[in-house]
Image (spheres, rainbow, N blue to C red):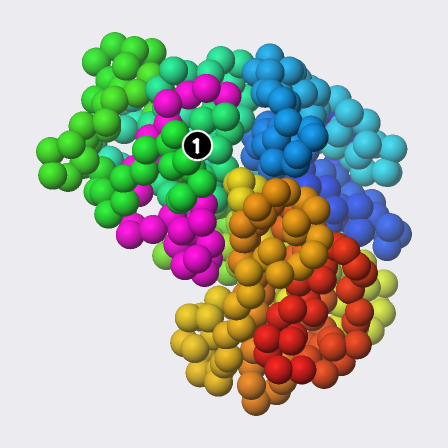
Amino acid sequence: MTGSATEQTAYDVIVIGAGPVGEVCADRVHRGGLSVALVERRLFGGECSYYACSPSKALLRPIHATHASNRVEGSEGARIEVSGVLHRRDIWINNLDDSGQIGWAEHAGLVPLRGEARITGERTVEVDGTTYRAAHAVVVATGSSPAVPNLPGLRDAAPWTNIEATTSHTVPERLVVLGGGVVACELATVYAALGSQVTIVEMAPRLLGRTEDFAGEAVRKALEEAGVTILLDAKAERVERPTPGGPVTLHVAGGRAVEGDELLCAVGRTPNSRDLGLDAVGAALNDQGYLSVDERMTVPGVRTPDGAPWLYGVGDVVGIALLTHMGKYQARACGDLIAARAAGRDEDDPAFVPYATRLGSPQVVFTDPEVSAVGLTASEAQERGIRTRVVDVPMDAAAGAGLQAEGYQGQARIVVDEDRGVIVGCTFVGQDVAELVHAATIAVVGEVPLTRLWHAVPSFPTMSEIWLRLLEEYGL
């Protein structure tokens, strides 16, 4: 599995980064008839599989199920069993053993190479001292890492990031969470349910600042009801941890000090673009370090002597949408394009351009209540100059909501482009709304006219009946 000077050193395509995005791109390229080397410096399967999406949702699911059961008359009494929750998480991440992912890659016909990759020249990649050459393309799919800002004392305090928080086998008595975005809110939900005394410190005036206002407010209310202390408009100034592994104190502007047994830093991501040798081939990075790509995920200005593109970027490292599903979407388009170009086939197929990223990525925040959304928020649509109408309906207007839980709470919103008669944004907040977002995604990406959506009849009594209520409120 590990490359050496005596092994094959030439492949049609080399993909750097074996997370879900790199795996998908490599697989699509290989399906197109090309040989592919897949390089990973850490665990095959990437951060999503071991430290982010999979473990966090594995932790959250029993919490959601327990809460949901207790909201239905006749099934009350469910409880969260901490050791069971953590054990289920360990199963989902295969105890941080990536042998299964390596086996998948080999079975799929890919060549897995473990080591540090560096681009050393045109279509040339060095992996731990061995040089490999790609006949057609090199793809950068190295993802991103949790950001730890230069806050005085923070790095010396050895804070948790999502990596430690999603794999810990202990539950701290007190957990301080720095940040108020998706990771912060989801993991605050986890640890509050597992028994931690959680405090969120967020410098913005609300949680989940990239969602509709009502979504962040619903999550704030629910977290506080779960016992979480939330400090908004709170600027962190410094961190103290006199003893390694001992109590940690986060000092906030205004003289307040928040103490905990662990401090989770959840303030964003940074691209894994350093030390890849990108500058050696003229690949441009933006001010935040993200790799610049065009609409076909090709790195501009990097060409062979005869003018052929050979360097591509997909996933978090390009900064278009830091979501696994959107990175995999880019990877499918990119992999198919590379295979088509290598075979001399027509490259004007619209499937080779991941244009949906312009429309607003679908996303689910797995808090309780859940937040699922796609497209533009009302304010984003207005900023783009779209003449909009916003339609809000309480989720309990759908008969299925009352079946899901007694006293169901939630809200649905559509943002309508009045000039075109189509939905450009949709947000659902409430228990079990994650599965509603794909229908909204189809409506937004497919630009389905409202007059046609009216004929998509929802089944009774399901949560999907909310679509009927939204369209009725709109006036159809």
The percent coordinates of residue 215 (x first, y second) are 47, 54
What residue sits 45% from the left and 45% below the top? 219
Closest to the observer, 202 or 161: 202
What residue sits 56% from the left and 65% below the top? 393
Read off the residue under disc 1.
226
Q: Residue furthest front?
A: 74
The percent coordinates of residue 36 (x first, y second) are 78, 43
What residue sits 64% from the left and 15% below the top? 84
- Dot 1 falls on a residue whose secondary structure is loop
Residue 227 figure quarter: top left
Residues drawn in magenta: 194-219
Closest to the observer, 312 or 319: 319
Q: The residue under label 1 is which amino acid type?
A: Ala
| 203 falls in the magenta region | yes
Vertical placement of residue 302 versus 451, above or below: above
Q: Residues within 10 Å of mark 1 (few under 14, many from 20)?
A: some
Judge from the rendering whether residue 370 lies leftward or rightward of residue 476; answer left or right. Answer: left
Residue 126 figure quarter: top right
The percent coordinates of residue 185 (x first, y second) are 45, 39
| 200 falls in the magenta region | yes
What residue sits 24% from the left and 17% below the top? 241
